[in-house]
Image (tube, grey):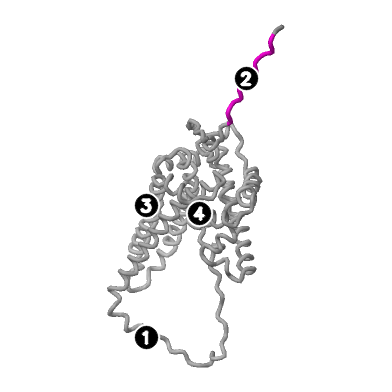
Amino acid sequence: MIVRHRPIEIGGMNGQKKIEILKPFSEAFELTKTVLFQPLDFRRWLVIGFAAFLAGHLTGAGFNVPLGNFPSRHSNQTVTSPDFGQLKPMLPVLIPVFVVVMLVVIVLFTWLRARGNFIFTDCIARNRAAIAEPWREFRKEGNSYFLFLLMLAFGSLLIIGLFCFVMFGVFGFFSQGSPDSGITPVFIILLGIFLVFWLGCAFFFGLTSYFMVPLMYVRRYRAGQAFRQVAGLVLENAGPFILFALFGICLLIGAGMVGGMAMCLTCCLALLPYVGTVILLPVFVFLRSYGLRFISQFGPDYDVWAIHVEAVPLSPPTPPPLQT
């Protein structure tokens, strides 16, 4: 039987509880062994791997490796380049169609990623291999998270577009001639300030959106309410979250190295969508478990295991011995 604990509102906790960085690492390692290797079930790997695939882990490596140009015995032959001039009359139609198709693909993958994050989290929290049940159970939360990610993505594109329009328009980079050399240093300084500001916002919104999922999973919040609470938590506990991000970067570098070795050992099979996800599933489960164990230190609101506690029935009291 599943017992749901009454959620508790929390604030800053630095003065009440020490937030560990390395302890969740060892806990995530043990949790990965429990989820994937106790017992070792290939069908279970396939299901949890599909959940990780939906969550955005499309291949076993997060980068594209150029394979280079291999020489051919016919390399001395002249290669005729295609005549792209014939496509010019069709560009007014091809460009809008290409833009629409790309937008549809971006929206579709963002939606699948939003829904998949809750499924993957549920597989780890409940130590089960399930897709359909968490897909239905967290439909409202997943769709709300999808709208948040979509607004965040298009808002970022809008800000970048406005910045480029203002900067290039003001400094004359759209003119026919070259820009005045006197304003080039000012342009470089403003560009540097914008990049620093952009990296800071990317760091803040990246952490906030990442830890919104555990809160929405536990409290069944909508994305707006979850964003406000997690944003306040990050600002009140900036130190632990910065250390988590720095340590997480080290883990991602290590995961990239493991992905590169897996690609070499499997003859590039790890680059195939879903196949690579299954091959490197322990890495993905470990990374997600580390984040879940870290955020759980901030209280029951963020502990995905606090709402799945097996209720143990109480045994009846032993009657006192009869007096003779």
Q: Nearer the viewer, residue 166 or 119?
A: 119
In the image, is 269 to the left or to the right of 186? right
Figure label count? 4
Q: Which residue is mark 3?
A: 151
Residue closer to the observer: 38 or 96 = 38
N-term mark: 4 or 1: 4
Mark 3 or mark 4, earlier in chain: 4
Q: Does residue 182 appear in this view?
A: yes
Looking at the image, tell me whether mark 2 or mark 3 is earlier in sequence order. 3
Relative to residue 158, is residue 63 drawn left or right? right
From the image, tell me which residue sits under label 4.
51
- Say which quarter of the image contains residue 41: bottom right
- What separation in Å lies between label 2 and label 4 (alpha carbons)? 45 Å
Instruction: Using the image, determine if residue 280 lies above or below residue 207.
Output: below
C-alpha separation, residue under disc 4 versus residue under disc 1: 44 Å
Residue extending farthest bottom: 77
Residue at image mark 1: 83
Residue 273 numbered tag: none
Query: Quick check: 151 left or right of 42?
Result: left
Q: CA distance from mark 3 to mark 4?
A: 24 Å
Residue position marked by numbered label 2 in the rendering: 317
Q: Nearer the viewer, residue 22 or 55?
A: 55
18 with respect to 84 (left or right): right
Q: Quadrant of residue 153?
A: bottom left
Q: Residues within 10 Å of mark 3 (few under 14, many from 20)?
A: few
Foreground tag (2 vs 4):
2
Bounds of the magenta span? 312-322
Q: Residues within 10 Å of mark 1 (few under 14, many from 20)?
A: few
Q: Quadrant of residue 299?
A: top right
How far apart are the alpha carbons under marks 1 and 2? 89 Å
Q: Residue at x 36, y 82 (%)?
A: 84
